[in-house]
Amino acid sequence: MKHFDTSLYFITDSTFCPEDEFLRRVELALMGGASIIQLREKTNSAREYMKLAEKVHIISQKYNVPLIIDDRLDVAMAIGAEGVHLGQSDLPVDAARKIAGESMIIGATTKTVTQALEAYENGADYLGVGAIYPTTTKVKTILTSTDTLKDICKAVPIPVNAIGGLNKDNIHVLKNTGIAGICAVSAIMKADDPMNATSELKQAAKALGLIK
């Protein structure tokens, strides 16, 4: 049985700072209480992605936090990452499961109940659902209503995480949706103090009863 905690799911963005500052911010987020981390690199070559992933994995292992690689199963397997996250245009979940085996954590992005059920039935371990709000990251987003989010949470027995423009001041809209956790990118990565921002977001989510 895989054990992982998606309550505060930290997703990286390296587009706005040099590598040393990026790695410093990653470590601060983990010090602040991020329970799982996804390395998301949309423009790097496979080799660049792998080199950065190896550096991030050293940090995440230090804090015993699972590292999820966005999009690239090959990179995840090459560096021994704990998991991979797949979008609707990436390798299908069932194909990734065949290649990676049962031990790897596989997450999937879904925006509808139909997509969520398909991902679950094909072997996904958790889902990312959104965007709840417009985002500042350079990822194409389609907004998802909290009603759809609630329907997805009811439809599948695996953890469902909300994603998209979330921060401590707007997560109240997620109350009573049934989510397992919150995904955050800019609220942590671009904060003046990523450690404090992570801690505050976690506390705000707990206060609202969104996470334990």
Image (tube, rainbow, N blue to C red):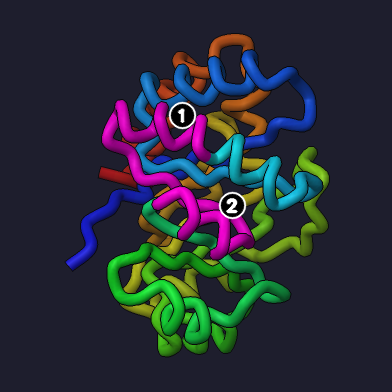
State the CA–CA distance, disc 2 to disc 1: 13 Å
Residue, x 57% and y 27% (percent of image)? Answer: 188
Q: Secondary structure at mark 2?
A: strand
Q: Amino acid at mark 2?
A: Ile
Q: Nearer the viewer, residue 196 or 179?
A: 196
Q: Is residue 19 magenta?
A: no
* Left or right, residue 94 beside residue 6: right
Q: Secondary structure at mark 1?
A: helix
- State the image coordinates of residue 184 (x, y, percent, origin top left): 56, 39
Quadrant in which the N terminus is drawn: bottom left
Q: Earlier in the sequence, mark 2 or mark 1?
A: 2
The magenta span reads: 54-80
> Which residue carries the number 1 mark?
201
Q: Is residue 57 magenta?
A: yes
* Left or right, residue 76 beside residue 17: left
Q: Amino acid at mark 1?
A: Leu
Q: Nearer the viewer, residue 94 or 201?
A: 94
Residue lying furthest left in this view?
1
> Which residue carries the number 2 mark?
163
- Where residue 191 sits, quadrant-wise, is top right
Residue 147 visible? The answer is no
- State the image coordinates of residue 52 (x, y, percent, origin top left): 60, 35
Residue, x 64% and y 73% (percent of image)? Answer: 111
Location of residue 76 with respect to 185 vertically, above or below: below
Residue 187 visible? The answer is yes
Residue, x 25% and y 43% (percent of image)? Answer: 212
- State the image coordinates of residue 54 (x, y, percent, origin top left): 50, 37
Q: Residues within 10 Å of mark 1 (few under 14, many from 20)?
A: many
- State the image coordinates of residue 80 (x, y, percent, origin top left): 40, 52
